[in-house]
Amino acid sequence: MATIDISAENFEKTITDNDIVLVDFWADWCGPCKRFAPVYDKSSQQHGDVTYAKVDTDAHPSLMNDFGIQAIPTLMAFREGVMVFNQAGALPGPALEQVIDAVKKLDMEEVHAQVAKLQAEHGEHEHADHQH
């Protein structure tokens, strides 16, 4: 599967309509982003069960602000609509594969239980840091 460009308008739908979604926050002027792009693209060809999304932070700064992103590239992984990974920096191919493998192996019943517990304690939503 190729990568898809997403925006503030379709971000939420993309992460809720797909089981596993990786999101690469990038910009044209960012050297590390340019180095990470072929790694990300190659990985997208190897995992048809994962949605690979890209957010151009210059075109969609509101998403950067919503998630409190301070540096790019930043990679986020969502599973069943829940953010399960968030890291700044260009990952090498093997590290990206480790992230994907770990996300696929997550016990999502336990993740949802932890989210529900946190929500009960703090009165927050799963996407508490993503405002609409």
Image (tube, rainbow, N blue to C red):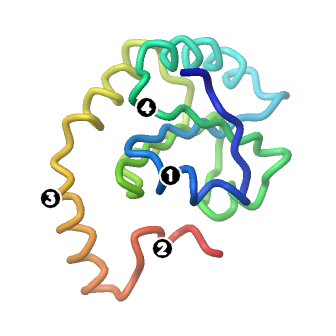
Residue designated by label 1: 15
Q: Are marks 2 and 3 in contact (CB under 8 Å)?
A: no
Cα separation, mark 2 vs mark 4, equals 24 Å
Q: Quadrant of residue 81?
A: bottom left
Secondary structure at numbered mark 3? helix
Mark 4 belongs to which amino acid?
Val
Q: Residues within 10 Å of mark 1 (few under 14, many from 20)?
A: many
* For the residues bearing labels 2 and 1, Cβ distance under 8 angstroms: no
Amino acid type at image mark 2: Ala
In the image, what residue occupies the spot 55% across and 31% down? 89
Q: Which residue is mark 3?
A: 110
Q: In the image, which is nearer the foreground, mark 1 or mark 3?
A: 1
* Alpha carbon distance from label 2 to label 3: 19 Å
Residues at badges 4 and 1 in contact (C-beta under 8 Å)? no
Q: In the rendered image, which quarter contains the N terminus?
A: top right
Q: Quadrant of residue 25?
A: top right
From the image, tell me which residue sits under label 2. Answer: 128
Say which of marks 2 and 3 sits in front: 3
What amino acid does circle 1 point to? Ile
Can you identify the residue that label 4 sits on? Answer: 50
